[in-house]
Image: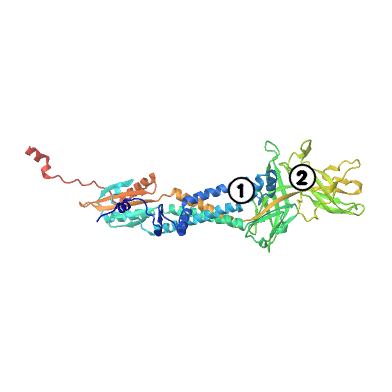
Amino acid sequence: MSTTKTDAAEVMSSAPADDTGTGEGPGGPQLGPVGWLRWLWRQLTSMRVALVLLFLLSLAAVPGSLVPQEGSDPVKVQDFVDRHETLGPLYEKIGMFHVYSSTWFSAVYILLFVSLIGCIVPRTWQFVGVLRARPPAAPRRLERMPAHARWSTDAPADEVLAAARRILGRRRFRTGASDDSVAAEKGYLREAGNLVFHIALIVMLVGFAAGQLYMSEGTKLVVEGDGFANNLTQYDDFKDGNLFDRDDLGGFGFTLDEFTGTYERSGPQRGSARDFRADITYWEAGGEEKKAVVSSNHPLEVAGYKAYLTGHGYAPVVTVRDGQGDVAYRGPAPFLPMDGNVTSQGVVKVTDYVGKDGERDQLGFSGIFVPTFEGASATRGMVSAFPALDNPVLFLTAYRGDLGVDSGIAQNVYQLDNERMEQFTDADGTPLAQMMKPGDTMELPDGAGSLTFERIDEWATFQVTSKPGTDLALAGAIAAIAGLSGSLFIQRRRVWVRATPDGHGRTVVETAALGRSESARVAEELGDIAALLHNEAPAVPEQQPEQRPDTDPDTDKERA
């Protein structure tokens, strides 16, 4: 049969056929939609991609600690936006001010979750199959193993193998026997530890996700003698997760009986805090009142919530009388610290004021409080020299007019908006300002009233939190450490013992061991097993082959 040049070229060509009907082209098999989905799934569920996603998640969390977050400090966020005209709007668009709830962080989080599940499920079934399988039979050439021992004994082969099974069983090896050998394997917990580690990562992710979705967190400033009830209207600020139901706030409350702070009095650490404690009386819905102490590292735990002591300061107690001589305001006014020595600023707002002529008006007092006054600086003004109440002084200025509290616009209760107010002045036109000690009184001009500095109370701020997933995340972290330790320090290894008759009434015993990774412990362990087996089947000198008569030296001599 003849063959044309064209046919020969087609036969001899090594180029891939371009047959679209079979799904193959110049580049090999063409993947359809299902094929691409399978390929993407294999890539996503590979351990390499899981590690990359875990690394990306750790990188994605970095901005959350470097950039102020809306959930924890909205004031700093607004200050950042005001100071950075370009970066501020950009950060808002890409979610830098709420990193942990941003779209890109959630995407990495979910992909890592799916990747870990895809890694774990098939490996779990493989591990179950390994547990159900028996150890592999002994190789034909045991002397080729990294660790090997051999000797001859007078003990029968079946007794040697029975002794080997007993010895290996006492050392927690799983054994399997054949006609002339015993196979044993140990170290399955290594793979179990690996699986526990990856499952623990999923548990941690679930715990963190639950903590963010069902969390609630708020702060409350409480003055000595005042109380707090776990109600939304009681919080100074409050935030919660997307799935948290605000109607499910736990029923509890407490009263701040006394706050105590101690400070270092001398040395290079002078002024440093030594102990902060808040003595409280708390109650839970349907329960009796109880006493407790809340300190920096010991929160109050009640009704599934934790109340942490996060700050403290001073609240001058003042009494304001109006132009009619009636008490228009009486109570503590919390001042907020500005430095480590508790130099504080604050305001007193009087909304129910009646002037000398009977007209209704509002008063505002703005000032500085220092617990230990040692003079004023021309550049810094009044500053405190020590955080304790050694020489307390209150410096106030007074205003009258519209406080803006009736405008319906939210405002800071610790700041005074004096744009629509007029400052009181003395007879010579000097703005009214006075430095006061406890017991002093500021008289307002023209019989407009007075303010008396009564005493000083202390206040404390509490952060009340509920994060249901915290315990789950902690359990996951502990399990991850345990699983990682097992996968690092446990070695999977195999041991074989073979006993075969040598044809001269004795038994040849061979032992060998193989580890999944290089380790001197494998040889040491085999030496211990061989020593125990040697006690059961002692070694004897191997028999030498008999000399043939034609090799007898005397015979050879006679022949010579």
In this picture, residue 254 sits left or right of residue 208: right
Label number found at residue 64: 1
Residue 47 seen in this snapshot: yes
Label 2 sits on residue: 345
Q: Quadrant of residue 247?
A: bottom right
Q: Nearer the viewer, residue 296 or 115?
A: 115
Farthest left residue in view: 559
Q: Give, as a three-letter code, the residue at label 1.
A: Gly
Q: Nearer the viewer, residue 441 or 154?
A: 441
Q: Nearer the viewer, residue 315 or 234?
A: 234
Q: Nearer the viewer, residue 508 or 92?
A: 92
Residue 264 position within the rendered picture, expressed as x and y whole percent measured from the top left: 69, 40
Q: Quadrant of the N terminus?
A: bottom left
**Mark 1: secondary structure:** helix
**Mark 2: secondary structure:** strand
Q: Quadrant of the C terminus?
A: top left
Distance in Å between CA atoms under marks 2 and 1: 30 Å
Residue 464 position within the rendered picture, expressed as x and y whole percent measured from the top left: 67, 54
